[in-house]
Amino acid sequence: MATKLSEVLFSAFPDLRYQPTEKRVRAMVGGMAVVDTLHALLVWEPKRVTPVYAVSDVDLRAELAPPGQQAGDVTEHGFRMGLEGPQALDPRTSFGRHTAAGEELDVVTSHGRLPRAAFRPADPDLAGYVVLDFNAFDWLEDDEEIIGHPRDPFHRVDIRASSLTVEVSLDGVTLAKTNGAQLLYETMLPVRYYIPPSDVRLDLMEESPKRTVCPYKGQASYWSYPDSAQGRNIAWSYDRRYRDAAQIHGLISFYNERGDVSVDGVLQTRPVSPWSRPDRSDGPGEGPGAR
């Protein structure tokens, strides 16, 4: 029988998963490397959709110590991976929510103590490795900054130019219309329509102070449409830090979970995702399969 690959990936969600990476990985504290290795692992704890780095004890230039303070409460942020996919934890659920057996540890460096920034899984395949809290360090892969979380080698972003007429409206008001959209296809995420600013009704919208990061596309700035309850932070544009996303630099996309998108006159079905609510705190890439 043929195998649907997405079902294979979904079936592994209850498991502790890892994948070696050949990239040079560095973790920095105060401008000094506490990790510099060519032998890091990417690790996904059960129900996690985004990976974190694990490094061997010999590659950690810091001490590990029992936690110096009690663990705080961690709020889980869950969602379902598609209509039939499993329940998962999205990136808003902090490192301190561990779904595998293991030991929490403090990382002690010359710059201070990082509480519970390491986790030693109780798994024989990961013996001698500790998983590190991404947010406790500044990270480099080779000589490039990594933001948000490590990039997943099984996650892909494809961008294709389209001459179809794409129109975005909210509460019956047209906010954008173009024949020059760039369509962004991202693993396990809805298609996104990136539109030239000249084809967006920015005069109807307000700039937002909100900023989010995506490991694959960069930092996003936002706009709101103030005349609708669904319009808060409904549109965004990425900066130019990643050449991989050059086709969408300076273009604007809208949450098609909350706005109405028509393609060549055909109204598209609104996808259901963690961004269906206007109070969603993460960015358009900080979700299933992401970045």
Image (cartoon, rainbow, N blue to C red):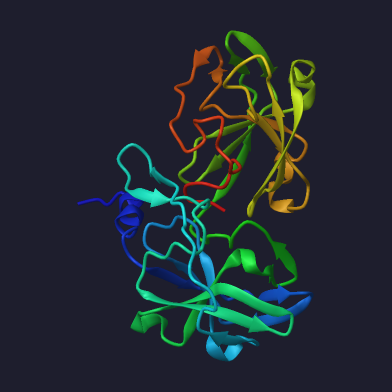
Quick one: which residue is furthest to the left in this view? 1
Question: Residue 101, located in which quarter of the rendered image?
Answer: bottom left
Is residue 76 placed above or below 58 in the rendered structure? above
In this view, the residue in front, 172 or 118, is 118
In this view, the residue in front, 62 or 163, is 62
In this view, the residue in front, 88 or 140, is 88
* Horizontal arrangement in the rendering, residue 49 relative to residue 228 (left or right): left
Question: Residue 178, located in which quarter of the rendered image?
Answer: top right
Residue at 70% of width from left, 79% of height from top?
112
Residue 37 seen in the figure:
no
* Horizontal arrangement in the rendering, residue 206 relative to residue 188 (left or right): right
* Horizontal arrangement in the rendering, residue 123 relative to residue 257 (left or right): left
Residue 139 placement (x, y as % from top left)? 68, 68
Quick one: which residue is furthest to the front in this view? 69
Is residue 252 placed above or below 30 in the rendered structure? above
Residue 69 placement (x, y as % from top left)? 53, 74
Residue at 56% of width from left, 21% of height from top?
259
Is residue 255 placed above or below 187 in the rendered structure? above
Quick one: which residue is furthest to the bottom in this view? 58
Residue 201 placement (x, y as % from top left)? 75, 17
* Total number of numbered discs in the rendering: 0
Residue at 57% of width from left, 22% of height from top?
230
In this view, the residue in front, 95 or 115, is 115
Residue 114 seen in the figure:
yes
Residue 25 placement (x, y as % from top left)? 64, 75
